[in-house]
Amino acid sequence: MFTGIIAALGKVVAVKAKGGDVRLEVATQKLELNDVKLGDSIAVNGVCLTVISMQSDSVYFDVSKETLERSSIGTAKVGSEINLEKALAVSDRLGGHFVSGHVDGMGECIKRETSARSIIFQFKVPSNLERYIAEKGSISIDGVSLTVNGVSKDIFEVNIIPHTLEETIIKDYQVGTRVNLEVDLIARYLERLVPGEKSNVTQDKLLKHGFLK
C-alpha cells in the first residue's frame, strides 16, 4: 500500500529482456534504501514492483508480461526519469490517499496549459474507468496522488502546483504522453457493495443502500 506522495525521482539504468519478461534496474538517487530489503515493494510510476536485488544506489525488479502490457513500464527506456515511493509503514502519515500500486489502465495527456504558477493538464481515460472518476475525488497518475479538478465523460483535469512539477515526472508531460492511472479504491469497492448497480454512483443510490442518512 502507498500514499501517492512521491519520495524521490529515479532513473532507468537498464532494461533487459528475460524469457518474455523484463528485468529493470533503477538508480534510486535520493531514495533512502537503508530500510528496504529483498521482497519489499516499491511503486515505480505507480506500479507496485518487488525488489529482487539491490546495490548501494540501485534496485532491480522483475516485470511480468501482464505488467508490461497494462502499464507504461513496458515503454521504459534507459535514462528515463521515474517516480518512486516506498511502501507505506504503519507509523507513516497518509499525506495523499490509499494507493495500491495496481494500475487500472493508461490515460493520455490531451492538453497542457499554464495557469499562474501551476500547470493544468487534461487526460483522456479508457471508457471502462469513466465512472470511477469524480470531481474533487482522488486519482493516482504515475503514482502521484492528485485531486480531480473537473470531469466530463472520458476526460478529467488536474492542477499541478510548482512543488509537484519539480519533484515528479509530471513536469515532462506533453500532449500525447501516456500515463498509468489508478482510480480511488473507495470508488471501486463501493460499486461492488451496491448490488446490481453498474452505472455512476449517485447520492440517491447511496441513500437507497444505506451509505448516507
Image (tube, rainbow, N blue to C red):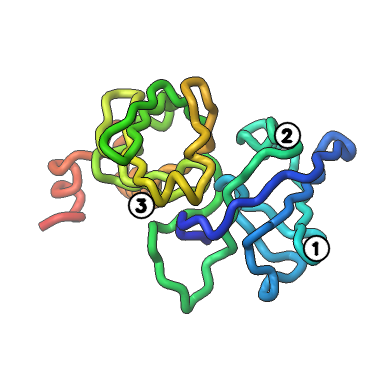
Report the residue that reaches farthest toward the left.
Answer: 213
The amino acid marked with disc number 2 is Lys
Q: Which mark is residue 203?
A: none
In terms of image quadrants, where is residue 122?
Answer: top left
Residue at (41% x, 21% y) in the render: 110
- The residue that mark 1 highlights is 54
Q: Earlier in the sequence, mark 2 or mark 3?
A: 2
What element does badge 2 sit on?
Answer: loop
Comparing labels 3 and 1, the label whose residue is closer to the camera: 1
Give the vertical position of 115 relative to 52 (above or below). above
In terms of image quadrants, where is residue 21?
Answer: top right
Report the residue that reaches farthest toward the bottom.
Answer: 91
Q: Earlier in the sequence, mark 3 or mark 1?
A: 1
Residue at (15% x, 55% y) in the render: 212
- The residue that mark 2 highlights is 77
- The residue that mark 3 highlights is 186
